[in-house]
Image (cartoon, helix red, strand yellow):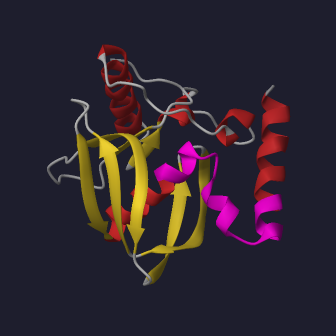
Amino acid sequence: MAVRPILVLPDKRLRAVSTAVARVDKEVRALVEDMFETMYDAPGVGLAAVQIGVPKRVIIVDPTRGEEEKRPVALMNPELVWSSEEQDIVEEGCLSIPEITEDVERASKVKVRYLDLHGKSRELEAEGLLARVLQHEIDHTNGVLFIDYISRLKRQRIIKKFAKAAKRAG
């Protein structure tokens, strides 16, 4: 297991559409282990493989906080099969866009179909924070970032800020 570097805006790889996992094998399970170590180290509540430079449809989530018992879930080839009409607007952030949060509107409840670590097809119904994290991470597998849900002006300011920081650093 290893903590891997997390890609940060404006890295163009964050916009890559991830490819499906053909089968859940030793390599995929090792990737998931690294992803959990990376996410917990950050710390975060979700991570997509593309955020560590692996454009595969693999996401992990654990919406627990602080001293709560951990509830990690790994999802391969996750797809949203249902989302509620009811929406919530909640402040969201992202490990690939550090120190930026914005209000984002998302479905309050969702149902996701995915493959588990044994390659078995499963469904997960979620609401609240878990529903939000699942939607956020599935978006990553499609090259979509949470800033795509905010006004164009705000989004352009954020992108410009990160492009300047990358130029100074590199």
Confirm whether the magenta stretch covers residue 73.
no
Q: Is residue 155 left or right of residue 50?
A: right
Residue at horizontal 34%, vertical 33%? 36
Q: Position of residue 52 (x, y in %)?
A: 53, 29
Quarter of the image where one finds residue 11 = top right
Q: Is residue 65 visible?
A: no
Residue at horizontal 63%, vertical 53%? 145
Residue at horizontal 33%, vertical 45%? 114
Q: Position of residue 126 (x, y in %)?
A: 29, 65
View extreme (bottom): residue: 86
Q: Main secondary structure of the magenta part?
A: helix
Q: Position of residue 140 (x, y in %)?
A: 56, 47
Residue at horizontal 30%, vertical 15%? 26
Q: Is residue 31 left or right of residue 66?
A: right
| Quarter of the rendering occupied by the N terminus | top left
| Quarter of the rendering occupied by the C terminus | top right
Q: Is residue 55 visible?
A: yes
Q: Nearer the viewer, residue 10 or 135?
A: 135
View extreme (left): residue: 69
Q: Give the residues drawn in magenta, as a range.
A: 137-156
Q: Is residue 49 left or right of residue 113?
A: right
Q: Position of residue 6 (x, y in %)?
A: 55, 32
Whether 164 is drawn above or below 156: the answer is: above
Whether 28 is drawn above or below 47: the answer is: above
